[in-house]
Amino acid sequence: MLKYIVKRCVNYVIMLFVATSMTYFLASAFMDPRSNYMERHPHPPIESINRSLTNANINDQTPILVRYWRWLKGIVLHWDWGLAPDQSSVRQAVGSRIGASVQLVTIATILSIVLGVSIGVYTAIRQYKWQDRVLNMVATFFLVIPAAVLGLFVALIAIWVNTKTGVRIFYVTGLHAYDGGNPFMWFVDFLQHIFLPTIVLLLPSAVGYHLTQRTYLLDTMNEDYVRTARAKGLPLNKAIRKHALRTSLIPTAVNVAFSITGVFTGAVITETVFAINGLGRYFTTTISTNDINGSVCIAAFGGLCTLAGALLADIFSAWLDPRIRLS
Amino acid sequence: MTQGQYDETTADEPNEAAEEKRHADYKRTGRMTLYVRRFFRRPSAVLGLVLLVLLVFFAVFGNKFTHWTYQDLDFAALGVPPNSDHLLGTTSGGSDMYAMVVRGLGRSMSIGFLSSILETIIAAIIGTSIAFFGGWFEKVGMWCLDMLMVIPSFLLIAMLVRSSSGTAGWLWLTFGLTVFGWIGYARTLRTLALSLRELDYVRASKFMGVGSFRIIVRHLVPNLGSVLIINTVLGVVGSVGSETSLSFLGLGIKAPDTSLGTLLNEGQSVAITAPWVLLAPSLVLIALTFSVQLIGDGIRDAIDPNSRSVGKAE
């Protein structure tokens, strides 16, 4: 078991390294920091542009491999993720914003798995009954509704509720507003803030889990071993929990890793809609300011989230499936 | 459906003359007819199809119903609510919302459909190749696919389309969506193609010396036909979602061109004061993705022989 996990870890580290390097080359090829300066009228002297670009290690006149080597050395030796075109440190900018994004992504991921899988099991047991049909229709609706539309409408509804009741129940901007010392008040304030963005992040991925878990469970529910368990006299609930559900959770666990990518993408939109100063919002800034180092750093963080999910999925499926554990 | 079953029961009968007579009376139900009938038996699928046809009609001929174009600015009517001249009102800049929505819908639709079709083609060829060749090629191929899925593709697309602008910007965006969109499909298709490579006629053609590419294109890909059709239809939802998200963030389609995402971005800032700017593109967008999803589900159930969701034929 331990050997298996270590092997997966090593594989993931190599994967992350290759993927991040690829992103670095891609970003260097397509983003043009020089245009930030050339667009100004009159543009600064060429030598001064070159000096600041070289200092940030994003000068397109330096060979790409030299730049890559410098960038890599900075990260490996000093954990220095480079400079933005305006000479500010990427590490500091990311460091101050990473907390908000981690909170959002983690809470939304965990809640969506719990919610999605339970609804999936609930509907699979009641296949083609009205509960199943209604929930499926609702799920299909939330599955296709684009993140931007969902975010905007949730915000509008919250504002409408606030004005109707006359009390500020939901906050539609930021993550914190309370700065007193009472931990209970702090927590309530936090909940008021994080509720809406979490809903927006959670809904699409929860209905995704619901629909796939329903399919997987329906596939395993008619297997011979479940029928045998029922024939032995096991109650339906127990037969499903102990025999069918256990097997059908494995493909769901594999899906978790890849749907974290979706949650991360959703976070970019949600943070923009709800004005949360997290990595997602920073990403749009880095793209529009041609900040190569900054955007690569966020891409690497996104990759790290995915692989953390993949590792958890590996451990979980090894725990569920003895064939993986023993091989 | 009834006729098909009737055929099967008569085939066992010994009386050949009677059988022939019946064959003359009853035409055999073809596979396509069966699929079409099953599709139309499902109300939600029909609803989706009607909705999509209406949207396509709206996107193509919608501009005939107004004299404004999406580029016109009416400085006499800034941010006015819907009225007889401006059917869906105007933005704070004076653009006619109706003309903008028609144009935006056309853009979003063409990007969605085009990139979804291209994605499916790439995914089908790469996914089946990985399964067909097997061995170390499969190991390396799968590792590469996994590696490509590590970084959220949305971020990579954003980097790529950053350098796009002008009228060809939407083609560039389609390219970006395609280049990073096929990876997940390829994984699914490879799993499905694993059992296909063991088929007798696939092995036979391999031993006969038929070229690998020819086997993949002639035997493996057609076998995945139904899955590919479903993937293409449902892929439109994903492509439209990515496109509108990018445009909403200001990283995709930019003025003077417009898409539904760009319009959402415009509507966000005036959501309280001028809700029609936000509502019109949102509703059209939801109608688009929802109709495509309903059609996709309908096709899946029509093609799937085990599906029981539309009831049994008696």
Image (spheres, grey):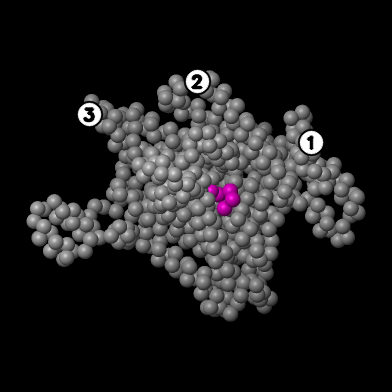
Looking at the rendered structure, the kind of residue marked 3 is: Ala
Image quarter hosting the C terminus of chain B: bottom left
The span shown in magenta is: B178-182
Q: Earlier in the sequence, mark 1 or mark 2?
A: 2
Q: Position of residue A119 (x, y in %)?
A: 40, 41
The answer to whether A326 is drawn above or below residue A118 in the figure is: above
Which residue is at the front of the view, B259 or A19?
A19
Q: Position of residue A103 (x, y in %)?
A: 60, 37
Tell me the tag on residue A1. Answer: 2
The crowding category of the residue bearing disc 2, from other C-alpha atoms within 10 Å (few below 14, some 14 to 19, many at least 20), is few
What kind of element bears circle 1?
helix
**Distance Cα–Cα, label 1 vs label 3:** 67 Å
- Tell whether B228 sits left or right of B142: left
What's the magenta bit mostly, secondary-structure-wise? helix
Label 1, on which residue? A70
Q: Earlier in the sequence, mark 2 or mark 3?
A: 2
The chain to which mark 1 is attached is A
Looking at the rendered structure, the kind of residue marked 2 is: Met
Mark 1 vs mark 3, foreground winner is 1
Label 3, on which residue? A231
